[in-house]
């Protein structure tokens, strides 16, 4: 009986987690179908092409083409076009679109302009990379995360890359949310799953944005599948990225237990059935268990594929999937 595993993912953390999960599935010769629902909140139009950072990070990471140290973009990349565009004074000089990466955006834009929805375009682009998992955008509609700051409402990527989240964020706005719904296959992937995993992606602007799309949040809260999350906060700080700046903007403490409470237990209308924290956060285990949570601690640093495979195995087991 094929095990249906669904992962909600942002960029780097979710992509690395999924790579470990797929490695585990292969190692154990598990008859499993992995579906990744990707955040589209980082997406933007730039130089007339559609850029989808989280979908591309997943596609490149699972397809073996990612620039490993960066965690995003292509290996063996160059920036001749980006540099020459800067000479025209166009675009965001602080945001580099690599030459190879541009081919992905040109291909995506061509297919979008031909009338294909993002979900069909993503399926077509992913064929080349053979990621080993089904990649679904959370929505076929444009839902872009913007950040409320003293500089005004700016695109998430400007806040994240240009300002390194250094400009205080008063809040996040999902522009386009009211006209957005779940992309085809997303709700079924959640309600029909044997287990749903929330990897250590950014709980606010990645997982949070996915959950902000009403049918998806509803599906998470109602699915018969166990939902297991992995804490992105270890020892009071984010392992990578700047989730602390996002959490403080919405008044959530940068703490493994606080993030669990932010997601909420399904028994109390939240989205989680179980929460995996790092061994550095044993106190969070005691706190949460006292509140009725299913909570365990393990090494959760996605150091390499083999280590990540073990983390994925622990999360699957917490979700009742024996591998
Ligand atoms: N991140 C950076 O820090 N600097 C960049 O110039 C940059 C360019 C870029 C281009 C395409 C793309 O898909 C991602 C890119 N990123 C860059 C990473 C991006 O900010 C992150 O992948 C996510 O949006 C945050 O998780």
Image: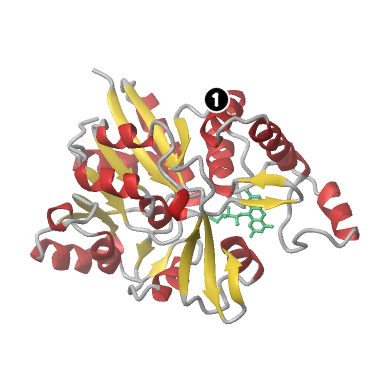
The residue depicted at 22 percent of the width and 59 percent of the height is 264
Placement of 205 over or under 193, stated as above or below: below
Locate the N terminus and report the quarter of the image it occupies: top left
**Residue in view at x 43 percent, y 65 percent:** 238
Left or right of 73 on screen, residue 77:
right
Answer whether residue 76 is visible to the viewer in this image: no
Question: Is 90 situated left or right of 106 in this image?
Answer: right
Give residue 250's position: percent from left, percent from top: 38, 72
Q: Is residue 69 depicted above or below 223 in this figure?
A: below
Nearest the viewer among 288 and 155 is 155
Residue occupied by mark 1: 130
**Colour approach in the figure:** secondary structure
Instruction: Provide residue 261's location: percent of width, then percent of height.
Output: 23, 64
How far from the left and from the top, in percent, is residue 25?
Answer: 36, 28
Ligand 1 - quadrant of the structure image? bottom right
Q: In the depicted view, which residue is nearer to us: 287 or 3?
A: 3
How crowded pointer 1 is (Cα within 10 Å; few <14, some 14-19, many 20+) is rated as some
Q: Residue furthest top?
A: 1
């Amino acid at each position: 009986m094929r095990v249906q595993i669904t992962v909600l993912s942002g960029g780097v953390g979710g992509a690395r987690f999924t790579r470990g999960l797929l490695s585990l599935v292969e190692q154990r010769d598990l008859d499993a179908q992995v579906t990744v629902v990707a955040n589209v909140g980082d997406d933007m139009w730039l130089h007339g092409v559609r850029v989808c950072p989280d979908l591309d990070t997943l596609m490149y990471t699972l397809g073996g083409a990612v620039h490993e140290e960066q965690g995003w973009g292509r290996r063996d990349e160059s920036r001749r076009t980006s540099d020459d565009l800067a000479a025209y004074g166009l675009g965001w000089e602080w945001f580099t679109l690599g030459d190879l990466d541009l081919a992905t955006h040109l291909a995506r834009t061509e297919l979008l302009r031909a009338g294909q929805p993002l979900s069909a375009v993503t399926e077509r682009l992913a064929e080349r990379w053979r990621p080993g998992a089904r990649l679904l955008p959370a929505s076929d509609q444009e839902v872009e995360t913007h950040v409320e700051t003293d500089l005004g409402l700016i695109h998430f990527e400007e806040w994240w890359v240009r300002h390194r989240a250094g400009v205080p964020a008063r809040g996040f706005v999902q522009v386009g949310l009211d006209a957005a719904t779940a992309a085809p296959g997303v709700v079924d992937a959640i309600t029909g799953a044997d287990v749903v995993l929330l990897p250590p992606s950014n709980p606010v602007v990645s997982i949070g944005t996915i959950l902000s799309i009403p049918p998806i949040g509803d599906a998470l809260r109602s699915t018969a599948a166990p939902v297991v999350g992995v804490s992105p906060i270890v020892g009071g700080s984010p392992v990578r990225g700047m989730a602390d700046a996002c959490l403080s903007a919405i008044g959530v403490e940068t703490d493994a237990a606080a993030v669990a409470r932010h997601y909420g237990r399904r028994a109390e209308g939240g989205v989680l059935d179980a929460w995996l924290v790092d061994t550095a956060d044993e106190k969070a285990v005691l706190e949460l268990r006292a509140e009725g949570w299913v909570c365990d601690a393990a090494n959760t640093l996605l150091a390499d594929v083999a280590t990540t495979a073990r983390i994925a195995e622990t999360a699957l087991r917490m979700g009742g999937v024996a591998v």
